[in-house]
Image: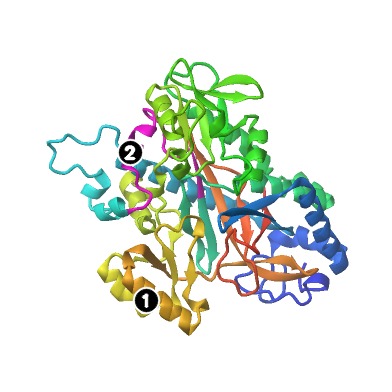
Amino acid sequence: MTGAPGVFARYPGTVRDEAVDPDGAVRPAYRAVAQVLETLGGAGIAAVADAVARERRLRGVVVGDHVDGRLQERPLPLCPVPRVLTAGDWAHLAAGAEQRTRALNAFLADVYRPAGRRRSDPDRHPEVVRAGVVSAAVISASPGHRPSAVGLAGPGQRRVTVAALGVLRGPGGWLAVSDDLSAPAGLGHALSNRESSRTALPRLHAAADADGLVDPATAVPLLRAALADAAPRECTGAPRLALLSGGPGEPTWFEQRLLAEALGVPVVTPGQLWPGLDGGVVAHVDGERLPVDVLYRHLDEAELAAHVTPAGAPLDVLVAEGVRAGRLSVVNVPGNGVADDPALYRCVPEMIRFYLGEEPVLATVPTWVLADDRDLAQVRDRLHELVLRPVDGYGGRGLVSGPLCSAAELAELQAEVLAAPHRFVAAEPVDCSTVPTVVDGSLVPRRVDLRVFTVAGRTTRALPAPLTRVAPAAGAQLVGSGPGSATKDTWLLGS
């Protein structure tokens, strides 16, 4: 299909749009999608968007945000126009995500060596610090560093079993922009999006499935196998899994229930966990006592100490005792925040070279750690050009785009940064790609990011269920999961 008739007649194709080029021609990967959209026409596309919204309301597809201490749920919109990735794009992204997960697992094993160094050793730092790759101060100052978490991983257990990597397609190609190694969310929504999309556009999906479209549901057995691979040393037979949740008050409660159902495992809350007679942990579910070998944690690690179990022990104590007894594994292991700290981000390429002896597959964004006086001097007068992020801003919290700030906001930001530069990291903004998105019945370009999930069991694998997130408005530079954002079904084309 060349030119841009019908629904694409006024669509502004650009060099950074993934579907339509500057001449108005639909790119090859999107031609099948474009043909169906042309058949539907503007009215048909609007009707499909309304049908998707109704279907998701009926299924209760929501996310939550805490506002003034209270959880407020809101729908998570899905644009019915899928995002399409070629087999070559996905092979590149999968290789890059797997590589970063392997390197960051090696880093965490180095930081949290179970026995530490000998007390007589004058330098007890991790090997990566001794080699000069990472500064000791960056690790010790990280809000995610938990020295007490050393004993929360069993012998040989990878501290990261499930990881999420944020990527953008920039002018020069794909960029890794953030790592989430604590309790990454979003995989359930990637599965849910395919269900909604297939219901809305059955004809399009039938043709794509016949051409080898990858089904995100194939990620589920890979996830389950990786969770089973994390089983503790005393586990014999098939590992018994459970998903640990804070319950209906959690912002990701919908996703947690969906994942548990897909995995065929129970959702358990701290109030259901008891010490077992063998030193492990038992969950009371529907009147039954179920021994648990692996807890798939969707509860923030800060909450572990806040919850008291029915037997009277704090949850973190019960978990630690089960791990020490060799009867329990926690996935992901607490303390991983030190590896996805924004201040560590710029060190990951060198970590890949140090631990793996490989060149990084994915490029990264130029970044400055403002705790370093030299870095601060380079950017203190460029805040209007950069993106600022607090070092404790996991999940994109607190992100500020300098180019979008008013003069008064920039003055306030500069004062805040200069008062406590150690709290911030600065990065160059990325002019990321756009994808056609339905807004008020019309197709318009919106910036998108991608969340790629990996699992690390006996092997490290990227899951074929990435999540595309859409910027909330025209011109919005920042893509995330906050109010106004939406998602797309992400198509991985067969080879």
In the rendered structure, find residue 415 and report the number of the disc placed on it.
1
Task: Pinpoint residue 129: horizontal percent, then vertical percent.
Answer: 24, 49
Please, which colouring scheme is shown?
rainbow
How far apart in space, not on screen, are marks 2 and 1 (Cα)?
Answer: 35 Å
**Percent position of residue 320, x then y:** 40, 30
Q: Quadrant of the N terminus?
A: bottom right
Q: Secondary structure at mark 2?
A: helix
Q: Is residue 184 magenta?
A: no
Q: Residue furthest bottom?
A: 407
Identify the residue at horizontal 57%, vertical 38% (top origin): 245
Q: Is residue 55 left or right of residue 144?
A: right
Query: Residue type at mark 1?
Result: Ala
For badge 2, the amino acid type reads Ser
Residue 109 visible in rendering: yes
Total numbered circles: 2
Name the residue at 30% across, 33% down. Answer: 114
Q: Is residue 451 left or right of residue 101?
A: right
Q: Earlier in the sequence, mark 2 or mark 1?
A: 2
Q: Which span is picked out in magenta?
A: 142-164
Closest to the observer, 197 or 10: 197
Reply above or below: 189 against 39. above
Name the residue tied to disc 2.
Answer: 148
Can residue 207 be seen at all in this image of the molecule? no
Tell me which corner region of the image, top left, top right, bottom left or bottom right, holds residue 26: bottom right
Instruction: Identify the residue at horizontal 37%, vertical 76% (top origin).
Output: 415
